Image (tube, grey):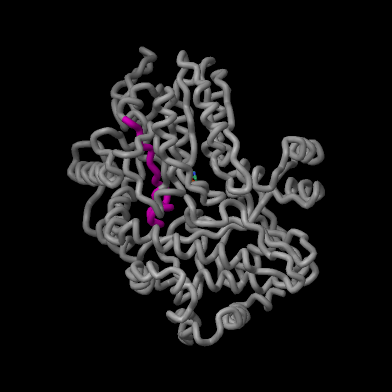
Amino acid sequence: MGDYFSASALFLVLDQRLGAECLEWHPMTMTTNLTTSHPFFARHPDYASTAVLDALRAAEYARLDVQRQVYLDYTGGGLHAASQVQEHAQMLSDHVLGNPHSASPSSMEMTRRVEQARAAVLAYFHGTDQYTAIFTLNASGALKLVGESYPFGAQSTLLLTTDNHNSVNGIREFAAAKAAQVTYAPLTRPDLRINQPVMEGLLVQADSKGANLLAFPAQSNFSGVKHPLDLVAQAQGKGWHVLLDAAAFVPTNPLDLRTVAPDFVVMSFYKMFGYPTGVGCLLVKNETLAVLRRPWFGGGTVNFATVQGRMHVLSKGEAGFEDGTLNYLGIPAIEIGLRYLQKVGIDTIRRRVHCLTDWLITELLGLTHSNGRPMVRLYGPANMHMRGGTVTMNLYDPHAHLVDYRRIEELAGTARISLRTGCFCNPGAGETAEDLTEEDIQVGLQQIGSEINLTRFSQAMQSRGGKSAGAIRVSTGIASNLADIEQFLAFVSGFRDQTALTIGTVSFDIESCRVVRDGG
Ligand SMILES: Cc1ncc(COP(=O)(O)O)c(C=O)c1O
């Protein structure tokens, strides 16, 4: 079965899908260009206005086609342009750079570059006057800063949407430790959007005697749903602070803090432009920064600390939140990445992702087995209204039995396709998508006990009416093109009329979100 999904077999299915007139072969790289007779171009005439991205694909992301790789995990991590890395390497080679914030020439040069990057981040999001930018390790680090510093108390509420990433869900531990109420706002099925009437009802329940925090993703990393950003002002008008998780949104969408002004915004830069990893950001409205209370101090965060006197004075502004030594050599690469993104144009990226996602969804939903049964079950919106380029699904065999998503990931790997499977650290969206009830979950927990992991939990849910606790996710971004989508569609088409017997069983397991292969 592994051979069945080899690259050449994949191209054969691709040929069958499209017909020779839509394909131009490039034997050197074994890649394809799709000619304009492909029906996609008639459906999406505005795709032509994104042609600059094809030129960039060839110049900046050539490694994809040279290695015949299909990258469909932009929600997991963006891809960097070759020139970003070259410019950064040049900067590192040309300058003597030391640990920032002292008076030596090497340190002062580094401080200047870090502050220049900080200013570039604020300018990119139009938050220069109103916001403070705090560099963190990643979006999760930014979320943890909010969680530990927010003044939760017994009269507070933490209101979360059900499709928050686990790094947002984790804030509930800080809230609960301070006796705050934790409430989840449900999603609608099958579109996985915020249930507006319920949300409105919850928003009016804030106790004005406590500090109240609403946290939601601008775009779900599970379903690709874009939640309405006017919820920010709506909640603030009712006395809430708002945390907007922009990690999955900003790689393909503009965010202008002059028109949407959450109290907190979090992101990871590698999701926006691939490089560097290890740097994220918390943007905090200046007036809200004053309400945060850090529960500890460390190197770099204090103006003064004494051992004998047992006191410390926290640094003002972002310095009070940036623990220890920053990733100072990596931070200038953020300015390079932002400049690159601006040159390309975020609206161009958004338009391309929109066209490709529409095509992908339409074609996936049209795939059927010979007996007429659908091959794919999509989670989230089946159209492009308020949704981005993240598409989550499961595959079913001709007898309507769920195909193991881990086996799909394994076979995708043999076809050089990078996609992601599991629950994507977003358990609530998955639970809603599959209609897992609290009873389902309690039964699963009791059956498995403390050895629970996603695989065992999935198996338990399978035995409860064939429900799934995981899925397959593909996502498009800056370097995506139609050939990527067609190769994925050809890969999925290869499962037509296949059953568990012919598809085979997976040879790896996943524990704590890490792949564990047989024997080690
Ligand atoms: C919506 C969302 N929030 C938060 C995160 C956490 O990002 P990181 O792992 O970079 O901290 C992710 C990562 O996938 C995400 O998609």
Residue in the picture at 27% in, 42% down: 126
Q: Position of residue 437 (x, y in %)?
A: 72, 39
Residue 439's place in the image compared with 157, above or below, is: below
Q: Nearer the viewer, residue 449 or 503?
A: 503
Residue in the picture at 37% in, 74% down: 58
Where is the N terminus found, in terms of image quarters?
Answer: bottom right
Q: Position of residue 379 (x, y in %)?
A: 61, 53
Residue 420's place in the image compared with 307, above or below, is: below
Residue 183's place in the image compared with 118, above or below, is: above
Q: Which residues are magenta?
A: 269-285
- In reply to whether residue 400 is colored magenta, the answer given is no
Where is the C terminus found, in terms of image quarters?
Answer: bottom right
> Is residue 288 visible from the viewing direction of this image?
yes
Residue in the picture at 72% in, 35% down: 438
Q: Position of residue 474 (x, y in %)?
A: 55, 60
Side of 313 where 419 appears, left or right:
right
Count of numbered circles in the view: 0
Side of 83 where 4 appears, left or right:
right
- In reply to whether residue 271 is colored magenta, the answer given is yes
